Image (spheres, rainbow, N blue to C red):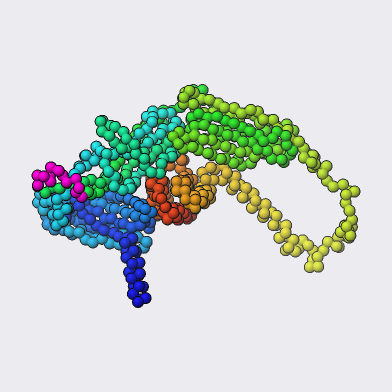
Amino acid sequence: MKLKYILILSYLFLLQNVSFSQSFSASVNSEKVGLNNQFQVTFTFSGTSLNSLSNFHPPSFDNFMVLSGPNESTSMQIINGAVSASKSYSYYLQPKNLGKYKIGSASITYNGQSYSTKSLTIDVIKGSPKPKSNNSVAAQNSSPNISKKEIEKNLFIRAIADKKKVYLGQQVTVTYKLYTRLSIASQMSVNKLPQYNGCWAEELNTPNTISFTNETIDGKLFKVGVLKKAALFPSQTGTLDVTPMDLTIPIQVQNRRNSGNFFDNFFNNPFGQSQTYNYDAKSNVLKIKVEPLPDKNVPPSFNGAVGDFTMSTTLDKNKVAINEPLNLKVTISGTGNIKLLDMPAPKLPTGLEQYEPKTNTNINRESIISGKKEVDYLLIPRISGQKVITPIEFSYFNINEGKYITLKSPEFKINVEPGAGGNNYANSSPQQSNIKLLGNDIRYIKTSYNDVRKKGGILLYQSGFWIAAGLPLIFLVGLVTYKKRSDKIASDVQLLKFQRAQKVAKSRLKTAKEMMTEKNQNGFYSEISLALFGYLEDKLHMPKSEFSLESAIDKLRGRKVQDTVLNNLKICAEKCEYMRFAPQKDGMGAMNEVYNESANVIIEIEKILSSKKV
């Protein structure tokens, strides 16, 4: 009896594993093709993940002309926490001669295991093929009662910019809206996210679920939902293009009954079966004209800030002793690209030493990017007397007033008093009266030459003497070499970023793990994106304003990074963007998977890049 239950449980376990296993299949849009007609062959790999997918080998197309291909497409769906992904390779072919021809099997490798498709048979006939027959009555008599043109009129995505003409560095808010009069069957999947070439982009906060409102366009009532909002800050002049957002939207349409019966056609059977049609929707291309900032009356302290800002500066004390630290805080608040602000640095007088400043940024991403950026400067006085810190200046271009504005801090005066021993360190030497005789600790100095010997001979001839004399010299040479290398790294910003890239990425991943524990999906996927993209920006010496995933992948490919690693990087980035766009109710499993995949991608890239020269 127990054996029976064990067999049943084993069968169910195997059945569950089979249902979620990987598969590689081939399909054709028509098995009968006219001699002068083209047809499509698609090879699709499906599974729970596309990691470690490589070595796709198509079959031979000797009897056909290859008009296009391979055309790659990747899709990913997450429904109720279950992740499914697929990658397709499609070809458009045209027959060369009449007859029946076989298309052989394609192969692909996943996790070291090879998968192959079944062969296909194509019947090439004269003229156009007849419609494919099917024994299923529902499939034979039913067809979607809406054409692609009708779908385009009743469902579309619009990219809307609040400004079409801006200054360099001025914010442009782009909103992606879905307009529909049709029924959406299930969750949408992202095919391609828009690229903001020539712009620094900040994602604006949007609700986790799409909330629809009503809007009338050309006399038709549409349901309208906001898909995505982004704040763009142009970093170069001229006309910039924002590429389309591409989504696959499953819509539910009613089947038409073609029975030939007059009454069936008249009433169209509203209680008939419906079917789901996957529609590929793309937004329009936006063009933004960017003008340079005025070149007249540009203040010397201007570093590219555009917006509306205020500045506050505080010094925690103005009376200190030598070597006693004091803190100077500079805060810039307002609207604009807070993240990329170049904070003003104080000009310090002689005798004040400055340590590495600490920066804190707080950004509000609602509709207009705003917030504040704080820098704490730790100062140590080394010489007594009155020290004066001249006013700190910060300049920006005010869009509303159309002119440059310079903000100034007050002048800071600091009284530095001598320390407990004063400035003359000779005064701090011990007095003779302070020396006490403790037992026999103090003895007379031996002056006889014969006493300066060791049992083994003269000290100068001993190896230990030379080792002891040489160690300080070796230590000094090593210290100088280390100092020169540190100064070189500190002066080379790109090299410094390259060296610290992994450390920064680890910090981001640690923050992401904390947010995963708190079940903060938005914050988790934002931190994972920052870890991936920030790491690539530093490692590849790419400015934030010019960074895009495609350009980063091209650079990595040029540095001999394997396609499997690049594919994993692309999938991780797409997953992060998709989950930010459509988070799940219980997404712990998905977050854990994304975290592990992202960490592995960074480790793999670090191994390759660190073994090569910067």
- Between 90 and 257, which is closer to the camera in this rendering? 257
Q: Quadrant of residue 361?
A: top right
List x then y, in percent, for residue 254: 21, 46
Residue lying at 51% horizontally and 25% vertically, measured from the top left: 404
> Is residue 280 visible from the viewing direction of this image?
no
The answer to whether 454 is drawn above or below residue 489 in the figure is below
Q: Quadrant of the N terminus?
A: bottom left
Residue lying at 36% horizontally and 40% vertically, measured from the top left: 211
The answer to whether 208 is drawn above or below residue 241 in the figure is below
- Between 211 and 608, which is closer to the camera in this rendering? 211
> Is residue 392 visible from the viewing direction of this image?
yes
Q: Left of 206 or right of it: where is 137?
A: left
Q: Is residue 379 magenta?
A: no
The answer to whether 222 is drawn above or below residue 588 in the figure is above
The answer to whether 440 is drawn above or below residue 131 in the figure is below
- Between 276 and 69, which is closer to the camera in this rendering? 276
Residue lying at 51% horizontally and 22% vertically, measured from the top left: 297
List x then y, in percent, for residue 293: 46, 27
- Between 328 and 152, which is closer to the camera in this rendering? 152
Q: Left of 384 or right of it: where is 88?
A: left
Segment colored magenta? 260-273
Q: Is residue 271 magenta?
A: yes
List x then y, in percent, for residue 547: 43, 42
Q: Quadrant of residue 151?
A: top left
List x then y, in percent, for residue 607: 47, 55
